[in-house]
Each structure stands twice: as C-alpha cells, then as structure tokens.
Image (cartoon, helix red, strand yellow):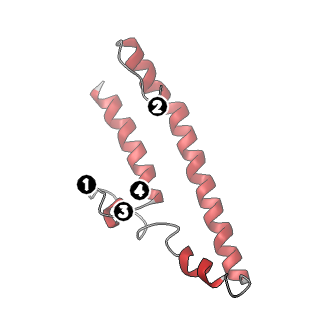
C-alpha cells in the first residue's frame, strides 16, 4: 500500500511541478525533476499591465492563447489522474477500511 500512496503522490507532485516550479517559490520540500522557470504564467504580469494604456498586440493575444491551452492540458491531466490513479488508491484504501482521499 505504501507504493500505491507514494506513486499517486509522485504523479500529483510531477503534475504540480509542470505547472509551477515550487523550488523557485520556496515551497518545495525536495528538489527533484526539472521544471519551468517559476511559473508558466509568470510572464503575463508585464503584458497585462500594458493593457491598461494600450490594446494588446497580436503577440500578447498569442501568449494568452498559449497559456489557456497549457492550463487546459494541465486540468485535463489532473482530471485523468484523479479519475485513474486516485480512484484506484481510494479503492485500495476502502478495502483496508481506511479514509479515502477527497471524500
């Protein structure tokens, strides 16, 4: 059972590291794997601050679409992980009479 818990935790951590590199936020407990530099959306602040005075450029709109697409991919991967790995882990926990994750 420890392997099932560790496996599910590692998959969630890997997905989280794809979205935000916790090593650069000071919240990481381990420095495993490689990830983006801070956050996939960290570059959007300078773009949005310009929008107050000027209309967004074509490049701004392209970046916005890329970030939306990346977010949709991450949410889809999370849904798949919850539906698969976490559901399997919950079934194992139920069989042992233990409390499940997210219920």
Asked if disc 1 and disc 3 are in contact, CB closer than 8 Å, the reply is no
Return the disc, 3 or 4, that comes first in the chain's sequence.
4
Q: CA distance from mark 4 to mark 1?
A: 11 Å
Q: CA distance from mark 1 to mark 2?
A: 22 Å
Relative to residue 92, is residue 58 depicted above or below? below
62 lies left or right of 99 = right
Which quadrant is the N terminus positioned in? top left
Crowd class of label 3 (few under 14; some 14 to 19; many from 20; radius 10 Å): few
Count the labels in the image.
4
Q: Position of residue 10 (x, y in %)?
A: 36, 43
Q: Residue at x 52, y 31 (%)?
A: 84
Q: Which mark is residue 17?
A: 4
Q: Which mark is residue 30?
A: 1
The single residue placed furthest to the left in the displayed view is 30
Q: Which quarter of the picture shows residue 97?
A: top left
- Residue annotated with mark 3: 34
Relative to residue 40, is residue 56 depicted above or below? below
């Amino acid at each position: 059972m420890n392997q099932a818990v560790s496996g599910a935790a590692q998959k969630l951590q890997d997905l989280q590291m794809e979205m935000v590199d916790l090593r650069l936020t000071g919240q990481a407990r381990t420095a495993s794997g490689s990830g983006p530099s801070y956050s996939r959306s960290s570059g959007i602040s300078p773009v949005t601050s310009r929008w107050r005075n000027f209309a967004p450029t074509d490049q701004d709109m392209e970046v916005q679409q890329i970030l939306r697409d990346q977010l949709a991919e991450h949410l889809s991967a999370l849904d798949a992980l919850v539906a698969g790995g976490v559901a399997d882990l919950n079934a194992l926990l139920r069989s042992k009479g233990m409390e499940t994750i997210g219920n």
